[in-house]
Amino acid sequence: MDVRLLCLLALLAVLAVHVPTSTAKPISLVERCWCRSTLNTVPQRSIRELKFLHTPNCPFQVIAKLKNNREVCINPETKWLQQYLKNAINKMKRSKQAN
């Protein structure tokens, strides 16, 4: 075997062993939307917490954590949710005007 070829293989082996690993997620996982499907009917009394996500590549997403620790995606166009958001915005406006 040629000495140059042997040196090249040794160098490639060293580089392959010492390549730093990345902790970044693949692009396909980063750009994936959380909610792939949404529910229109979720009993409001079973909701413990609401999370609102707005990412550049996905539409507005509403995630409800239920009292049984299950997370479901709620359709943002649901009437009760729209009213809830309007009330929250109005409450924030009133509190800013009071200060």
Image (cartoon, rainbow, N blue to C red):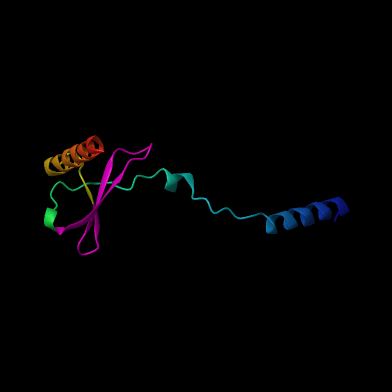
Residue 43 in view in this figure:
no
The answer to which image quadrant residue 99 occupies is top left
Does residue 64 belong to the magenta stretch? yes
| Residue drawn at the location 16% of the way across and 43% of the way down | 84
| Residue drawn at the location 43% of the way across and 48% of the way down | 29
Q: Provide the residue span drawn in magenta.
A: 46-72
| Residue drawn at the location 25% of the way across and 37% of the way down | 96
Residue 31 spot, x, y in % from top left: 41, 43
| Residue drawn at the location 82% of the way across and 51% of the way down | 5
Residue 28 in view in this figure:
yes
Q: Extreme front residue here?
A: 99
Residue 34 spot, x, y in % from top left: 33, 48
The answer to which image quadrant residue 89 occupies is top left
Q: Extreme right residue here?
A: 3
How many numbered marks does the figure carry?
0
Q: Extreme bottom residue here?
A: 68
Does residue 69 belong to the magenta stretch? yes
- Quadrant housing the N terminus: bottom right
Residue 50 spot, x, y in % from top left: 24, 51
Residue 6 spot, x, y in % from top left: 82, 55
Between 64 and 3, the residue placed more toward the observer is 64
Question: Would you place residue 68 above or below residue 31 in this image?
Answer: below
Left or right of 6? Residue 37 is: left
